[in-house]
Image (tube, rainbow, N blue to C red):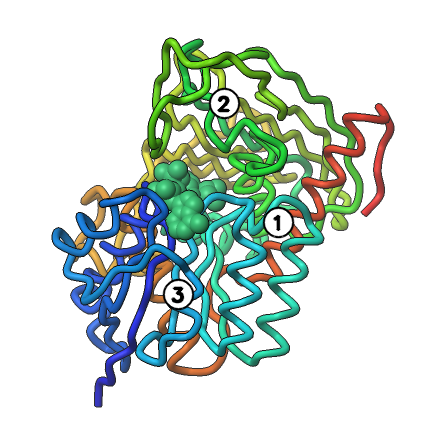
Amino acid sequence: MVSALGVAVVGFGWMGRVHTQAYARVPHHFPQLPVRPELVTVVEDVPGRAEEAAERFGFATTARDWREVAADPRVHAVSITAPNFLHREIGVAMAEAGKHIWIEKPVGLTAADARAVADAVVRAGVQGTVGFNYRNAPAVVYARELIAAGEIGTVTHVRVRLFSDYAAHPEGALTWRYERERGGSGVLGDLASHGVDLARFLLGDITALTADTAIFVPERARPTGATAGHTRATGGEPGPVENEDYVNCLLRFASGARGVLEASRVAVGEQNNYGFEVHGTKGAVLWDFRRMGELGVSRGTAYQDQSVSTVFVGPGHGAYAAFQPGSANAMGYDDLKVIEAHHFLRSIAEGTPHGATLADAVHSATVLDAMSRSAESGAWVSL
Ligand SMILES: NC(=O)c1ccc[n+]([C@@H]2O[C@H](COP(=O)([O-])OP(=O)(O)OC[C@H]3O[C@@H](n4cnc5c(N)ncnc54)[C@H](O)[C@@H]3O)[C@@H](O)[C@H]2O)c1
């Protein structure tokens, strides 16, 4: 029997919309789920935005203050898709109110924030799923399986890249993302958090690192109105960019493997150039988010001049079969969020976590904090 599960979405910018659409689509792709999400309420700070979302996506009610959701008995699960500085307060309060949470990365401003939310979830006995969506890509799941099965030998080194240009325009508005108080770190929390999660998902724990960071666009204009996503602003009062645009980092893994992680939000010419190359003693796996359904695989016994084949993912790789019946039908970013919604709802239905959890967010945030410390001191940091 399928039972209804009341959900709320707090913060209706890009991620709020994507979570909402994932709730709507999840029963289409995963009909075996014993719970069916019902859109109870949407919370927004910007006047009119919640009402517009309710009208367009079918929420029963709207609210201006997220505390109303914590007290609302109709709501059993909450998407926390507000800016980073609100993650801790809202995450802890929702867990304490007995709501399951699907919270966006990086889960707060620091590892202490992520830990506070993780602890609250454990104390309350609710489920907590985190928005590390790239690990949901069927090709990434397949890469992990190949690595774990020893298909590329012993992993020697990995390169993880997250290059984007969303902050490259000098007129990009000085939104919450560029402030320490509301955004926390810059590209570390925004993109490198995904990279750290991917590296751990594929290769296991990171034990030591050294990092270097830089701000390349030091000043931006403050927005003159409400913002969502990466708004442009001209004429607003200029203010300083307080967090890093760029990071490069050397990694050591518990396995002995080495890695390089590089992330930039100001890389002109790069749009969502996210991916990895994992090398082992006998082969390699290569992935690029922009060609999400393809995995480059080099395996065999040649060692030198060994070719790379492109595997088009299909049924049997990760959650692909929930979307398409045959290989090489392209999936998109939003599909990764449908998979994440499925993990969240399945965790609630079964009382056991599936997919990325708050423990994963704490691991990622701990590594990011270590990167910040290393960038300040110039030294290697052990974890
Ligand atoms: N997983 C991913 O790939 C991914 C991608 C983008 C963003 N994110 C994360 O999602 C979160 C939101 O990012 P976004 O890009 O959607 O930002 P956004 O700026 O587009 O949206 C944030 C929304 O929250 C609203 N808001 C602010 N304060 C509020 C409050 N007190 N109550 C209710 N609503 C409030 C804003 O008005 C805005 O509409 C961030 O933590 C970000 O790191 C994750």
Cα distance in 3D space between marks 3 and 2:
29 Å
Mark sitting earlier along the chain (1/2): 1
Instruction: Residue 265: give its label.
Output: 2
Cβ atoms at labels 3 and 2 below 8 Å apart:
no
In the rendered structure, which amino acid carries the disc numbered 1? Answer: Arg
- Which x, y percent locates residue 246? 60, 21
Residue 359 versus residue 98: which sits nearer the camera?
Answer: 98
In the rendered structure, which amino acid carries the disc numbered 3? Answer: Val
Cα distance in 3D space between marks 1 and 2:
22 Å
**Corner quadrant of residue 263:** top right
Is the CB–ligand 1 distance for label 2 below 8 Å?
A: no
- Which x, y percent locates residue 53? 20, 51
**Corner quadrant of residue 289:** top left
Q: Relative to residue 202, is residue 267 drawn left or right?
A: left
Residue 218 versus residue 126: which sits nearer the camera?
Answer: 218
Cα distance in 3D space between marks 1 and 3:
26 Å
In the rendered structure, which amino acid carries the disc numbered 2? Answer: Arg
Circle 2 SS class: loop
Residue 284 versus residue 124: which sits nearer the camera?
Answer: 124
Q: Nearer the viewer, mark 3 or mark 2?
A: 3
Q: Local crowd at mark 2 within 10 Å, few (<14), some, or many (≥20)? A: many
Task: Kindly identify the residue that appears in the image at 37 percent across and 16 percent down.
Answer: 233
Instruction: Residue 13: give its label.
Output: none
**Residue with the mark numbered 1:** 200
Q: Nearer the viewer, mark 1 or mark 3?
A: 3
Task: Kindly identify the residue that appears in the image at 46 percent across and 28 percent down.
Answer: 175
Is the CB–ligand 1 distance for label 1 below 8 Å?
A: no
Instruction: Residue 78: give its label.
Output: 3
